[in-house]
Amino acid sequence: MVAAKVSGSAGLTKGLMNILRLTSTGVSGGLTNPVLSIIELTIAIALSVLAIATPLVAGIIVIGVLIFAIQKVWKFFKRKPSSQQSESIST
C-alpha cells in the first residue's frame, strides 16, 4: 500500500517534469533544458541533505532537552530540605 503511494508521487513528479521539459523545448528549442536539469539536480540534492540532516538535528535537540531535564530533576532531589527554626517561648 505504501509503495503505491511512493510510486504515485514519483510518477506525478516525473510527469510534471516531463511536461515542463516538453514546454521548455517547444518554447526555446531545447536551450533551457540544461538549466532545468541543473535546477532539478540542485533541488534533489537539497532535499536529500534535508532528509538526512533533519532527523539528526531533531535527535540532538531531544537529547539536549533530556540532559537539561535530568539535571533539573537531579538538582531538585539533591537540594537539602529547608530547616525550620523552632521558636522558643520564653516565660
Image: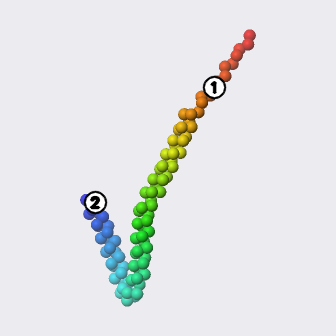
Indicate the quadrant where residue 10 lies: bottom left
Label 2: how many Cα within 10 Å (few below 14, some 14–19, many 20+): few
For the point 42% across and 61% down, the residue is 52
Instruction: Give, as a three-letter code, the residue at label 2.
Output: Val
Which comes sooner in the sequence, label 1 or label 2? 2
Q: In this view, does 81 lie above or below 3?
A: above
Is residue 79 found left or right of 42 in the rendered image? right
Q: Do the residues labelled 1 and 2 touch (CB within 8 Å)?
A: no
Is residue 58 found left or right of 78 in the rendered image? left
Q: Name the residue under label 1.
A: 83
Q: Residue lying furthest right in this view?
A: 91
Q: Position of residue 2 (x, y in %)?
A: 28, 59
Q: Residue lying furthest top in this view?
A: 91
Q: Is residue 72 above or below residue 21?
A: above
Q: Mark 2 points at which residue?
A: 2
Instruction: Give, as a three-letter code, the residue at label 1.
Output: Ser
Nearest the viewer among 37 and 14 is: 37
